[in-house]
Amino acid sequence: MSTPILSTKLYIPSPRSRAVLRPRLIERLNEGLRLQRKLTTISASAGSGKTTLLSQWIKDSRLPVAWLSLEEGDREPARFLAYLVAALQTVGVDIAEGIISKLQAPSPLPLSVEAIVTAILNHIATMGNRFILVLDDYHVIDSKPIDSALGFLIEHMPPQMHVVIASRQDPNLPLARLRARDQLTEVRTSDLRFTSAETSEFLRRSMGLDLSAEDAALLESRTEGWIAGLQLAALSMQGQQDAATFIRTFGGKHRDVLDYLVEEVLQQQPEGIQDFLLSTSILDRLCGPLCEYILRSEDRDAPKNTISGQETLEYLERVNLFIVPLDKERRWYRYHHLFSDALRQRLTRTGASAAGGERDVSELHRRASEWHERQALLLEAFQHAIAAQDVDRAARLIEGEGIPLIFRGAIGPVLHWLDSLPKEEMDARPALHVMHASAMLMVGQMTGIEPKLQAAEIYLKAAEDDYTRDLIGHIASIRATLAVSKHQPGTIMAESRRALEFLSPHNLPVRTATIWTLGYAYQLQGERAAAGKAYREAVTISQKIGHIMINMMATLGLGMIQEAENQLYAAAETYRRVLDLAGDPPLPAACEAHLGLARICSEWNDLDAAEQHGQQALHLAGQFEHIDRGVACEVFLARLKLSRGAVSEAVAMLDRADHFARQHHFTHQLPHIAEAQVLAMLLQGNASSALQLAQKFELKLSLARVLLAQGDTAAALVMLEQLRTDMEVKEWVDEQLRVMVLQALALQAHGEKLKAAQIVADVLGMSEPGGFIRLFIEEGQPMRELLSAATVSKPMQKLFREAVDKSKQKQLLREAIKKPMHDYLERLLHAFDAERLESGVTSVFVPGFVQPAESLIEPLSRRELEVLRLIADGLSNRQISERLFVTLSTVKGHNRMIFDKLEATRRTEAVARARELGLL
């Protein structure tokens, strides 16, 4: 069983019973709480008593305290946040399991630190009691992402929370702003320095030295009140006959003083203790069994080592030899940081003597690595293997016993080590090149991946064993994933098949990822059935082995297939399941699920929800590098603006998206951008430019729409008939539905209203299970007439065909509209009425509904049309505000926009102009 470590980081150190009390400093800390300041910083040099002061203050505090002791290994944002969450849980902050599981997931995933902090803040806000969060030794972090996250937390944290940071230097936070707002309490080195009186009390009470007032004052002057220096000096003075002479000769620069005193302290200790201190100084954390393991002798003839690691650690604590307990059971300890640094420096220079010889530093690290590996502490084992310069051991450890370390949140250390290895070491172990490429892929360093894969291949050609074949398969899988980001179906397909051919049957994580990439290739090629089969297989396997990332991505693929099959309700449920897998806060890959939900909500005519999901998708997509998902989100949001009548804004967004896509060679997105631009051009009355753009990108459905808008219904019908046949052959029911809608409108405009009504009836049958609404609304009044005609009974249809007089047909149609309609059709017609699209202002995709460019530069929005009609009805501004449940200032704002767009200065002019344009 491994010795627990995480809990030691959350242990609040107990104040020493003989420590000097600092009432003036404790009062300053209490003042920060009384004034409800956000932050307290204790910024001072090493050994100044920061932790001791905090432990004294907390002992008498009535508030619960979450304590987190930090180390250099905590610089990884995911690791830091995991420990932060654990600390907050100790004071009752109920952190959601989604956050915890995501931070502890074996698969390393790109995370939004700000999003995680936001979620944590939301949970803190639910607490009713005040509490203190202490971050000790914050200076070891040195991480801009963590600095930003902490700054965000402090800026937005609720009033019941107070943060205390102990650090050797000012944290990289907006301290000036907090200081100006009186939100900061500061304790600095000068505050922590002992006065002469405190020095005398410290030497007498803590160190057992009874010096004269003059000697104490001199020592305080020599050390400048530096507590660690005082302690080192006091240890050296123990047993000295002439303390005054020692104090007078004591001095020098900080490093010289430290080196001198450590040597003097060490020389006063028994040889066994010296050996123990130097040998164990390589450890960040110490426990008895670990110390015994690295101190054991390999010489069978040497006397058996009888040193008890635990007893020695307890002895060092009793004699105040710079050791700090990390848990209440006194199982784990650490050396004072300065003492540890000095011991390591001496160890490097001289080695540690034992049994008449010297210990090799590399051997000590190798033993530490062995012990940590046996305790399943693989990251610590890996780090000691690196320090031992044991490349073979480190290379084996990063494999992680089936789950590589890069899948355990250790991407940074592994990548840093691989970056530092000489080329000959990498070439001698092709697997390291593959691991290097995999790690680079996970952090988005796309450009350097292929050279690593090629380097590995050079040294794999000669070998034919199973291990080599598996590496070849892994290389192909990485290349397939690279091709996914570029939407290259041919490359994805070839590399995925090669990967499955070479990968070991037991390498389930990589095989499952490859099945997913194969499914995406099928999807790009339009082979939707094959894609769905691959996605389902990937979901099944990934759920069995706990591969969260592939489970999420394959489930996402299934949602896209359902959406393409017009199963909108099933697709929405699948996308929501993806969001559950992505956790809270969601992983960046969840952007695709939000985008899918945005499309579905838009189709269901819930434009507000659609925009919300679209914005969330855009935010998450921004966390990726070198992929086009942000462009896809921009295009969707631009189309949403078109639906809302904000044409100018949509055009600007599409122009930006087009420029960005071309600049970054996202050619896959250009047809999608062009399709939206065609609609915008039609809204602006620029049919000729729309025609050119549709032809340039061979957008057949868009081209048919332009022909229809230009009145060439015959040409549009020919094209639509062929398109419908093609879609039916491919069984692309989503595209078939879009074609049939436009085909019905073309037939209506061509005078074949009965055929149009029959197609609309078929469309209704296809669209009703998915609850489609915008599919119809976007086509405006002509579609509303077709939907009304769809309610005509068969006898009425016969009368309609026999009626040669158009006025008679219209009369029959009006009578038919009064017949009972089923629920779905009622919903559609109510949706039309709610949007008031019968005016035709926003319906510009069919003849007679193209907004002339010279009429209005920018169409009126739906709300502006509603206000305009109420103005025409003679309502006052106040009456309009009461009717629409908005403020009076909002109504006046709408009036200004209406007058600007209609080039009017008063109400009567606006109404007259609107009537000229057919808006009223």
Image (cartoon, rainbow, N blue to C red):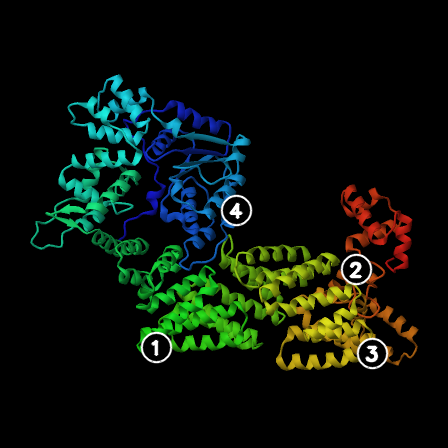
Residue at image position (63%, 70%) is 566
Residue under circle 2? 833
| Other residues around mark 2 within 10 Å, as few (<14) / some (14–19) / many (≥20) | few
Disc 2 versus disc 3: nearer the observer: 3
Residue at image position (21%, 44%) is 278
Name above or below for residue 663 compared with residue 248. Answer: below
* Amino acid type of the residue that numbered disc 3 sits on in the rendered structure: Glu
N-term-proximal mark, 2 vs 4: 4
Q: What element carries label 1?
A: loop
Cα distance between the residues tagged 3 and 4: 58 Å
Disc 2 versus disc 4: nearer the observer: 4
* Amino acid type of the residue that numbered disc 1 sits on in the rendered structure: Lys
Residue under circle 1? 461
N-term-proximal mark, 2 vs 3: 3
N-term-proximal mark, 1 vs 4: 4
N-term-proximal mark, 3 vs 4: 4
N-term-proximal mark, 3 vs 1: 1
Q: In this view, does 84 lie to the left or right of 801?
A: left
Name above or below for residue 754 compared with residue 889. Answer: below
Residue under circle 4? 118
Cα distance between the residues tagged 2 and 3: 25 Å
* Amino acid type of the residue that numbered disc 4 sits on in the rendered structure: Thr
Cα distance between the residues tagged 1 and 2: 70 Å
**Residue placed most toward the observer, 423 or 313:** 423
Residue under circle 3? 752
Callout 3–callout 4 Cβ contact below 8 Å: no
Cα distance between the residues tagged 1 and 4: 50 Å
Q: Is mark 4 on a helix, strand or loop?
A: helix
* Amino acid type of the residue that numbered disc 2 sits on in the rendered structure: Asp
